[in-house]
Image (cartoon, grey):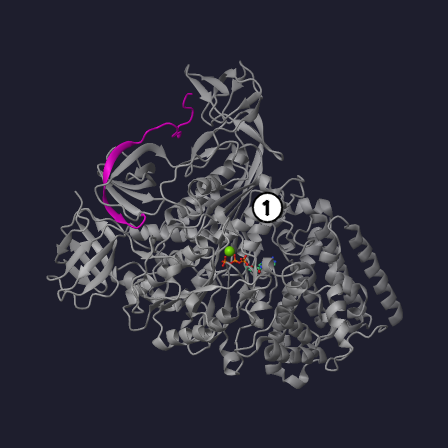
């Protein structure tokens, strides 16, 4: 087998280089490292703990170690690998769960039981597994960077498109015939212009801190439909967009991320549990295989990859976990897929950065965070986007990051810096969460800059979509002002039209904004249903306003039999019987006609 | 050549709880050291940082009485370990896991490092067995499940200890008759608190199933860093090797965090909020995540950490970071407490995140999730109306709002409030919930289904005379 990628570590024996001189938690210093490069992966002590060089000064290297360093001593050896920290990309990623440095947790359990021990070395992809390879090129074909030269069915719902490395150009000289191969078998050979022959397998290594190249960015004009009404209708995210979910503890960041991982219209989901709870990952592992993707009709786990570096796992690996996740996402994007990355929580990542920076005795900026925090955040969110891939396809990476501000106070550095680099802000509100109004996404403090970009898509569902959406939004905004008055004089002192606004706003909250993730039906709301619900509510408001103008009262409206239906429509109307909402709309009109007749 | 077991004489510097040594060789990170004071007294410490010839050591018993010249330090080459096993049941240990009950040392062939190792998330089993605590505000509104970590956020003077004792006394599973072993860790609390728990365990006759690790208020503060770790190491062994169901009470986590802050300050680390180190979150997670269930093992660890919120401030770093790690929180409310309501469990900020999978059909009762959700919604509305009533006066409220006021009163007096020795079944708790809901008109209850309304709301409504008839048929 021939080495085909610059970052491959397969088969290398690390060379002994330096000796440990200092140990301070996850930060280790070693001398005799003159030959080592910045960001090179090293193995520390005879336990061969994985680390990465983050600073080189003369022959002293500072290393962040991805495993517990207890028991390490000065004088112990450090081995270089000559390689940057990389992930292994190829068939077999889907459905897997990895730690922050892409070690497969299922295999680790098989080796060492319930606890994660140090020095585990398990390859990320199963090298013995045979994949059905189907060539898409033939000898003599021109070979271009990123070109799809073959494919294999990775899961029932996802075809894995095998791509040439981005730096390869030339002529295909050999392709394996269709058949079963493992990821280390050479399946294609390309002769480059310089007379060199490159052998290509089904797997490739890619340095996690380097963005994978694409041809160019393209406009984002499709929403990433999430099935969550407050998101899709009020604060939509575009396919390839970036969003942040800030909120204090228990306000619903993880539930929202899980809902999006389950129901959003992306083809591939990369879910990064970054410094959060072990049980939340277990929950995904337990639940996803049983849930059916409404689009492919297959198990959700078939399109999902989990990266779990929970809060009790080593902090340096937490720092790298989000890069591991986003690199995998870019890889599937390059195949022409729409990928969504959830990172829960980016604050824990920032804290890992802070802890490591503190141990390096760097100058702190805001609240102890290093001065390069905003740069790192920008780099991360920049890896999202919709692109024309090297092979001419369209693919996207949408990035949704949870933010956990201390004390729920959004003025802290991570929330503040993040909001500069994202275009969709779903602010979770403590009051709403306490009142069990879920999702607790505030309609006053949230925003989406994608609304204008994607409204065309919704207008194809119904041309009046934007008008209805804006009408309901206006009611919600008006309510706030009226509430201020009502809190002083009591709502009954307000004129009937204003009380109507309060009543409709309440109805919008209960019937539309609230969406219980545990409700069999309402956990997912398809776009057609959202549009019809929107239509019913807008009509309810308009007809009510007219009725009151003609002398009707709020009490008349409350008593209409259709009201009970409207409040329960989200879960009483099955998702595949949206026509019932058209009937409800007609019924509402009839009841109002009747009420008007009574008044006249 | 290793210096393991070798003794060094003399220190370079003593600073707060830290010793700085140089001229060393072969010291490893995190290892335990034995320190002999000039007077011959022995203390334990641990290496926090090591370079080629120097080390920083934290001394658990504090550095009072040590001097640069006469102090001897022996490096053991090992991490801090404690003996574990069934033999620990019924025993009392100090904050570092040494016997404190005048009984001989624990005879166990197994000693484990107190730091433990992270549980592989893949190996976890999702917790979903409802624990009936007999306390309505928990069982009905914030249910606890086996393997959950559910802290009590309290304040000075509030009855968190009584609630924790009531939980340990009454906790049981619905379908099986399995009892809990209890691991109790005290950090910086007064002797009376420990005494209160010991008495309470004794009264309920469970003392033989309790393991205690006590680092009391007059014990050296740094040793508190080890106490919860020792307790959890013991609990992990009982749960995952001996297949027992273990309930761990950790009190008071605020004192633990203060000890951590003390070390961080002594090391001149850059603080984050209120002087606490930036790694407080990770450090606490290293404790709280040692709860749960794992595949293929019968046992479980359920954690009820207790913490007092300085000035009742829930946004203080200790409750804040705890809430970010645990699976919900039981928040005690000063106002309810002042009004004499026991247990003063705050209705809205309390939350159990694992409740959803532990209750309802086939677990507690089908209507449980909806009843809880409806109670929360109605009670939150009560809060708004009370605020309004405070401005415009109660008489000015609309008839509906008056019903809400009445509901709020009944909810607090009969659903939340109960006696310290009252053990309510979940059916009783649900019935109390419905009773309160019946005060409200039917049309207000949109979080419960029509079927649930006809089964639980209508039936008794004709009989009950308290509530006015709601929505008489044929109106309009
Ligand atoms: N859409 C929803 N439907 C129903 N319940 C919800 C929803 N969102 C949140 N909840 C409730 O709120 C609880 C807390 O939500 P979640 O775990 O997502 O909070 P979080 O913001 O991630 O908190 P932390 O920062 O501590 O991780 C959940 O356990 C659930 O009970
Ligand atoms: Mg969360």
Return the residue nearer the eye: B407 or B424.
Answer: B424
In magenta segment, residue A356: no
Which SS class for mark 1? Answer: helix
Q: Can residue A482 be seen in this view?
A: no
The residue singled out by tag 1 in the image is: A288
Q: In this view, does A333 lie above or below B475?
A: above
Q: Where is residue A473 in the image (x, y as percent from the top left)?
A: 65, 60
| Quarter of the figure that contains the N terminus of chain B | top left
- Main secondary structure of the magenta stretch: loop
Q: Can residue A117 be seen in this view?
A: yes
Q: Where is residue A137 in the image (x, y as percent from the top left)?
A: 56, 19
| Quadrant housing residue A198 | top left
User: The numbered mark 1 sits on a residue in which chain?
Assistant: A
Q: Position of residue A226 (x, y in %)?
A: 62, 48
- Give the magenta range: A1-26
Count of number-bearing discs: 1
| Quadrant housing residue B187 | bottom left
Q: In this view, does A189 lie above or below B132?
A: above
């Amino acid at each position: 087998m021939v080495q085909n990628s610059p970052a491959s570590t397969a088969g290398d024996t690390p060379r002994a280089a330096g000796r440990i001189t200092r140990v301070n938690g996850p930060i280790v210093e070693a001398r005799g490292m003159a030959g080592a490069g910045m960001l090179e992966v090293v193995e520390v002590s005879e336990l061969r703990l994985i680390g990465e060089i983050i600073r080189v000064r003369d022959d002293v290297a500072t290393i962040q170690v991805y495993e517990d360093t207890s028991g390490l001593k000065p004088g112990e050896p450090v081995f270089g690998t000559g390689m940057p920290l990389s992930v292994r990309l190829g068939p077999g990623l889907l459905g897997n769960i990895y730690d922050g440095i892409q070690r497969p947790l299922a295999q680790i359990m098989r080796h060492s039981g319930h606890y994660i021990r140090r020095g585990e070395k398990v390859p990320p992809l199963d090298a013995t597994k045979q994949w059905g390879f189907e060539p898409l090129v033939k000898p003599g074909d021109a070979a271009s960077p990123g070109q799809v030269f073959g494919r294999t069915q990775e899961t029932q719902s996802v075809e894995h498109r095998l791509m040439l490395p981005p730096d390869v150009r030339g002529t295909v000289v050999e392709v394996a015939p269709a058949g079963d191969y493992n990821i280390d078998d050479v399946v294609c050979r390309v002769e480059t212009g310089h007379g060199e022959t490159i052998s290509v397998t089904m797997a490739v290594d890619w340095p996690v801190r380097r963005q994978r190249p694409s041809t160019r960015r393209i406009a984002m004009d499709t929403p990433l439909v999430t099935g969550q009404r407050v998101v899709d209708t009020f604060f939509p995210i575009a396919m390839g967009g970036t969003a942040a979910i800030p909120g204090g503890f228990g306000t619903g960041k993880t539930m929202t991320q899980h809902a999006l991982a389950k129901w959003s219209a992306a083809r591939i989901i990369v879910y990064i549990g970054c410094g959060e709870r072990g049980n939340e990952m277990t929950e995904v592992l337990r639940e996803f295989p049983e849930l059916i993707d409404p689009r492919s009709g297959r198990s959700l786990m078939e399109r999902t990859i989990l990266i779990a570096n929970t809060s009790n796992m080593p902090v340096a690996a937490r720092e790298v976990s989000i890069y591991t996740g986003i690199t995998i996402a870019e890889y599937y994007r390059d195949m022409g897929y729409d990928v969504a990355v959830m990172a829960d929580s980016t604050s824990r990542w920032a804290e890992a950065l802070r802890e490591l920076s503190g141990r390096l005795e760097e100058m702190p900026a805001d609240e102890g965070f290093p001065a390069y925090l905003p740069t790192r955040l920008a780099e991360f969110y920049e890896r999202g986007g919709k692109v024309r891939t090297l092979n001419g396809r369209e693919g996207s990476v949408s990035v949704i990051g949870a933010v956990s501000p201390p004390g729920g106070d959004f003025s802290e550095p991570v929330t503040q810096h993040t909001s500069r680099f994202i275009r969709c802000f779903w602010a979770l509100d403590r009051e709403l969460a306490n009142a069990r109004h879920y999702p607790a996404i505030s309609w006053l403090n949230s925003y989406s800059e994608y609304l204008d970009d994607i409204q065309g898509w919704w207008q194809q569902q119904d041309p009046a979509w934007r008008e209805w959406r804006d009408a309901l939004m206006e009611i919600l905004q008006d309510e706030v002002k009226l509430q201020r008055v009502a809190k002083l004089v009591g709502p009954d002192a307000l004129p009937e039209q204003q009380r109507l606004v309060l009543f409709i706003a309440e109805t919008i909250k209960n019937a539309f904004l609230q969406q219980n993730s545990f409700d069999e039906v309402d956990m997912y709301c398809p776009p057609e249903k959202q549009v019809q619900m929107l239509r019913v509510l807008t009509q309810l408001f308009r007809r009510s306003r007219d009725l009151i103008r003609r002398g009707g009262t709020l009490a008349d409206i409350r008593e209409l039999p259709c009201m009970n239906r409207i409040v329960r429509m989200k879960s009483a109307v099955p998702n595949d019987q949206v026509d019932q909402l058209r009937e409800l709309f007609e019924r509402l009109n009839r009841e109002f006609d009747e009420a008007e007749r009574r008044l006249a | 050549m290793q210096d393991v077991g070798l003794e060094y004489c003399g220190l370079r510097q003593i600073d707060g709880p830290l010793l700085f040594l140089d001229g060393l060789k072969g010291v490893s990170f995190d290892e335990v050291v034995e320190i002999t004071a000039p007077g011959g007294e022995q203390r334990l410490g641990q290496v926090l940082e090591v370079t080629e010839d120097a080390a920083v050591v934290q001394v658990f018993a504090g550095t009072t009485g040590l001097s640069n010249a006469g102090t001897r330090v022996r490096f053991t080459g090992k991490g801090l370990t404690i003996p574990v096993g069934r033999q620990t049941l019924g025993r009392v240990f100090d904050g570092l896991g040494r016997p404190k009950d005048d009984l001989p040392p624990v005879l166990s062939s197994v000693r484990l490092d107190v730091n433990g190792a992270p549980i592989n998330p893949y190996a976890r089993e999702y917790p979903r067995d409802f624990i009936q605590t007999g306390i309505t505000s928990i069982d009905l509104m914030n249910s606890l499940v086996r393997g959950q970590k559910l802290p009590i956020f309290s304040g000075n003077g509030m009855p968190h200890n009584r609630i924790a004792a009531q939980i340990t006394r009454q906790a049981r599973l619905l379908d099986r008759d399995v009892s809990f072993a209890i691991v109790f860790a005290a950090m910086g609390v007064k002797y009376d608190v420990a005494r209160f728990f010991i008495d309470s365990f004794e009264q309920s006759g469970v003392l033989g199933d309790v393991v205690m690790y006590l680092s009391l208020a007059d014990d050296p503060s740094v040793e508190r860093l080890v106490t919860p770790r020792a307790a959890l190491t013991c609990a992990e062994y009982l749960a995952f090797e001996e297949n027992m169901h273990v309930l761990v009470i950790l009190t008071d986590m605020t004192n633990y965090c203060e000890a951590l802050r003390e070390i961080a300050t002594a090391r001149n680390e850059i603080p984050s909020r209120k002087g606490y180190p930036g790694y407080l979150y990770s450090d606490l997670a290293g404790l709280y995540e040692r709860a749960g269930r794992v595949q293929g093992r019968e046992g479980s660890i359920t954690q009820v950490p207790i913490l007092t919120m300085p000035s009742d401030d829930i946004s203080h770093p200790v409750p804040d970071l705890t809430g970010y790690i645990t699976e919900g929180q039981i928040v005690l409310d000063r106002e309810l407490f002042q009004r004499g309501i026991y247990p003063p469990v705050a209705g809205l900020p309390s939350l159990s995140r694992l409740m959803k999978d532990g209750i309802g059909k086939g677990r507690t009762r089908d209507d449980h999730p909806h009843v809880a959700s409806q109670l929360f919604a109605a009670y939150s509305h009560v809060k708004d109306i009370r605020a309004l009533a405070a401005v415009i006066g109660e008489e000015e409220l609309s008839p509906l709002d008056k019903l809400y006021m009445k509901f709020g009163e009944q909810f607090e007096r009969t659903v939340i409030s109960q006696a310290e020795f009252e053990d309510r079944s979940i059916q009783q708790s649900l019935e109390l919930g419905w009773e309160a809901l019946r005060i409200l008109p039917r049309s207000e209850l949109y979080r419960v289904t029509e079927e649930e309304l006809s089964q639980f709301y209508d039936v008794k409504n004709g009989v009950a005379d308290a509530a006015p008839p709601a929505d008489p048929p044929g109106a309009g």
